[in-house]
Structure formats: structure tokens, C-alpha cells
Amino acid sequence: MISIRRPTSTTRACDATSAPTGTATQIAVLVKADGLDRCMGGAAQPDAYAPWVDNTERLRVVLIGGSGFLGRGVRERLVQGGHDVVVVGRGRAASHDGWREMTWDTRSLGSWTKALDGADVVMHLAGKRVDCRPTRNNIDELIASRAGTVRIVGDAVRTLEEPPKAWVQLSSLAIFGDSGDEIIDEKTPLPADGPRQQVEVCLQWEQAFRDATVGLPRTVLVRPAIGIGGADDPATAQLARLARLGLAGSVAGGRQWVSWIGIDDFLNQLVRAVTDSTMRGLYHLTAPTPVQNEEFMAAYRSAVGRRFGLASPAFITKVGATLLGSDPALAITGRRCIPSRLITEGYHFRTTAIASAVESAVRAS
């Protein structure tokens, strides 16, 4: 039985050196499992992903939509670990050192389905970027690019003589919409409604996954938070630019929660989901230290050397996002999520302090 509770004088909270100050320290996350309290955090651990990559068995892995920011990171680590990787995407078919590309149109079966036959793992990463106006057409495209492509891969799997042994599926913590101060983990019930571009998109995405994977021996569903870090980190590129312009103040009052995860921890767990056959079911991929928007934005200001950032009230954010072709809900809504399963399994996060994560991300960008 997992219990999530605030620390008392008789329980051990995160060390002050292992968690950020401010709002994050108000909710030190303690998980009690088998009578043992574990508090995850601390300094970065070198080569943290190596235990998940160094697999004695060479795996055949198919990455669907694996040409983007996350897909490149997963592919590089799997190839480094000696695995055979095929990336199915919209690019031209080609062979590379340790991996190859196959082409699909995202809507129909084709020669790309041959890569799935006899594969050990398929990982589905495809999906239109969420940074778009929440019009009906755009939301329909978000659903089609996620749930629709999952259904196509499911159709392909059903035609195979030897289906993949495992399917790893990306979803999002945005499935919880705008959840206020509630602490959310893998056991939290899903909302009945919420912003369509968040809740409905994710609900259909996950249902398509459940339908497509009936009968497969192993399935893993991961709901990630905002990934921070890496040279191509889209969130950092945009937020660091705003911070340099003096525009990275708190948004809509700054009290909404931001769940986030450092890129090394993010990729560690995606690779682990591929290579570790004991990893099954639902996981939240997020640091155990969510922060509020005001602290999140302050971290970017600090990283670029700006003391001041112009605050943006909700109505200004809505107007500005619309003019820029973005979705104001990305900044205005929030979720206070934690990774209970990773904590109980003993995973030691490389990064638990938002300031350190953002500083590293800005330096790498």
C-alpha cells in the first residue's frame, strides 16, 4: 500500500541540499513501501542511464515517430547499448551506423510494417506538437496524430506472424487538465472533463493504446512532464528567449503547479522501459519536486542573468498566446504530479532542483 503524506517530525524529508527552496520544499514527497521511507533526490549521478542500456541481450527496437527531440535521444542511447534500432518516420529511408530509417505516411499500412515483425519492442512517440492554437481543427489533428497513429500501428501488429513482445507508449500528464493543488500520482482517478486539447486528446490517446495492445505480453504507458535539457530542448529555447527579453515573469498569478523532469532522467526511463522487462503498466515520468509557475519562471530568469521579468496576467497571456499561434492553457493550467512508482522502485533522480535543471538546459542550448 503506497501512502503519500507530508513530512512530520518522525519521518525523514528530503535533505535541504537535494531539493530546491521555495514552493517545492513545501511538499517533500515521502513514499512508504514495505515499511521503508524513501526520499529521492540529491546530486546528479554519472552515467545514470548505463544500467538500463547495458543489456546482455541485443534487442530489436522500432521507434514510431522517433525522429524528433525525444526519439533522437532514445535512439542514441539504444544504439550505444548495442541494440538494433529502426526509426519509422516521415523522412527518407536510409541506413546509418547502428540504425536505419523507414518511411510511413502516418495513415496507412505499408512496407514499414515489416520492421515490426519479430521486433522485441515497439515504442510509439509520434504526435503533432501541442504548441498550437486550440481550434477545433488543431485539436482534431492532435488526436489524429496520436490516437490515430496508435490505431494504425495496432492494425499493423494484428497482421504480423510474430508481433512485438512489448509496446511502450508515450502519453502526457496533461491528461489531468488543470488540477489545482491536488497531489497526483499513478493511482489518481482521471478527470471526467477539462481542456479538450489536454484531457480529451490524452484520453483518446490512451484508449487507442489499450485497444491496440490487447494480447501483447508486455505494455508500458508513460505520462511525462515537461522535459528540460538538451541542445534541442524546445521549452528552454522559448523560455530562455523570453527571459532575456525581460518577459519571463510569473504567469496568471504564478500559483499553478509545473511538473517537470530533467532530460537525463526522462531518457533514462524511456530507455529502461525498452530494455527492462520488469517495467510494466503505468508510470509518471516527472521529478518528485513539482514547483509553482513563479518559481519555474524565476529559474529561467536566474539562468540568463535577469533579475526582473514582466508578469503576465491571465487575460494578457491568452491574447498573447493567440497572436503567437500558441495555446494559453500550456502556461495557465497546472498539475502537481509525482512519480510514486519510480520512487518505490528505488530510482535515484539525477536532477530534483529546478534551478539546476534549467541552468544546465540553458547552458546546453
Image (cartoon, grey):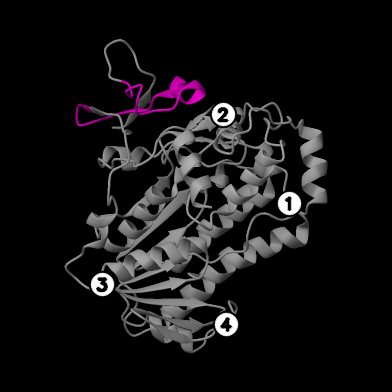
Residue 249 placement (x, y as % from top left) = 68, 31
The amino acid at mark 3 is Gly
Q: Quarter holding the N terminus?
A: top left
Query: Which badge, 3 or 1, comes first in the chain's sequence?
Result: 3
The amino acid at mark 1 is Ser
Mark 2, residues whose alpha carbon is within 10 Å: few (<14), some, or many (≥20)? many
| Residue at 32% over, 42% down | 342
Indicate the secondary structure of the residue bearing disc 2: helix
The amino acid at mark 4 is Ser
Q: CA distance from mark 2 to mark 3?
A: 40 Å
Q: CA distance from mark 3 to mark 1?
A: 40 Å
The residue indicated by pointer 4 is: 108
Residue 8 placement (x, y as % from top left) = 33, 13
The residue indicated by pointer 1 is: 326
* Contact, mark 2 vs mark 1 (Cβ under 8 Å): no
Residue 180 can be seen, yes or no = yes
Q: CA distance from mark 1 to mark 4?
A: 29 Å
Answer left or right for 247 relative to 88: right
- Judging depth in this view, the residue of 128 and 303 nearest the camera is 303
Mark 1, residues whose alpha carbon is within 10 Å: few (<14), some, or many (≥20)? some
Above or below: residue 85 compared with residue 315: below
Magenta range: 13-36
